[in-house]
Amino acid sequence: MKVLGIAGSPRRGGNTDLLLAEFLKGAVNKGAEVKSISLNSLKMTPCQHCDACFKEGKCRIQDDMQKIYDELEQSDIIVLASPVQFLGPTATLKAMIDRCQCLWARKYILKIPPLNPERKRKVFFISVSGTRIKCMFEPSITIVKAWCHVLNIEYAGDLLIQGIDEKGAILGHPDALQKAYESGQNFVGAGLKPDPTKSG
């Protein structure tokens, strides 16, 4: 079982980073192979809407996003972690999602699977917000779910925490960190259980 953590915050070691780290620790505890990518450390050009991907389902821009396409292909569980900024995910995470336009083209223009269909991928979304506005997370969840729909990935859960803003403030909420850890354990544990509908 391969778990890919994608850190969407530009603030390294911040609250979503810490929650993501706990999720991955929980996944490792259950025997998963994990990898974490910080989007802010990558060189990634925004989607140029050039439609070149309509021909072969590949993005013509040769930058670090090519590495992410490869990691998505090889992962079973993908954990997206991003704080809320102006009622949405960070610009870095949204840029990554937008660059999956080539996978949209595969599915809807070329009529081929956006990713290798042999893996049944799931997504877990981690997000924090500094304020407690009602419906704070809904725009981000809508974007992430749209991305999942295009890539044929199951949106299988989330951890959403309000009232966390200052860097490291999540450390004062050990219950939230424990939930992230247990989510990592549970996700991997569920994936390792035998399918009761299959025999042999």
Image: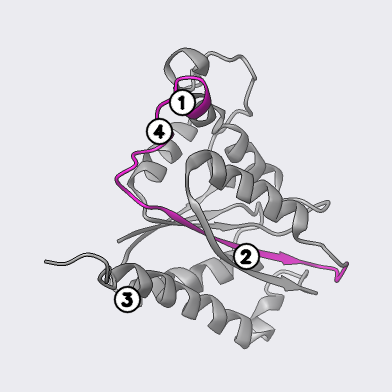
Of labels 2 and 1, earlier in sequence is: 2
Image quadrant in which you'd find residue 194: bottom left
Residue at label 4?
113
Q: Is residue 79 left or right of residue 198?
A: right
Number of on-image labels: 4
In the rendered image, residue 73 lying in the magenta stretch gets the answer: no
Closer-to-camera residue (5/186):
186
Mark 2 vs 4, N-terminal side: 2
Give the farthest residue toward the right. Answer: 133
Which amino acid is tagged 4? Pro
Q: Which residues are magenta?
A: 107-133
- Left or right: 3 as drawn, with respect to 80: left
Distance of label 1 from label 4 (alpha carbons): 6 Å
> Is 117 inside the magenta-drawn segment?
yes
Residue bearing the label numbered 1: 106
State the CA–CA distance, disc 2 to disc 1: 31 Å
Between marks 3 and 2, how big is the CA–CA gap?
22 Å
Q: Are marks 1 and 3 in contact (CB under 8 Å)?
A: no
Give residue 11's position: percent from left, percent from top.
Answer: 66, 57
Residue shown at 34% from the left, 42% from the top: 117
Are circles 1 and 4 on residues that touch, CB within 8 Å?
yes
| Residue hosting label 2 | 16
The percent position of residue 33, horizontal first and vertical second, equals 30, 62
**Mark 1 to mark 3: distance in Å?**
34 Å
Q: Earlier in the sequence, mark 1 or mark 4?
A: 1
Tag 3: amino acid: Lys
Disc 3 target residue: 30
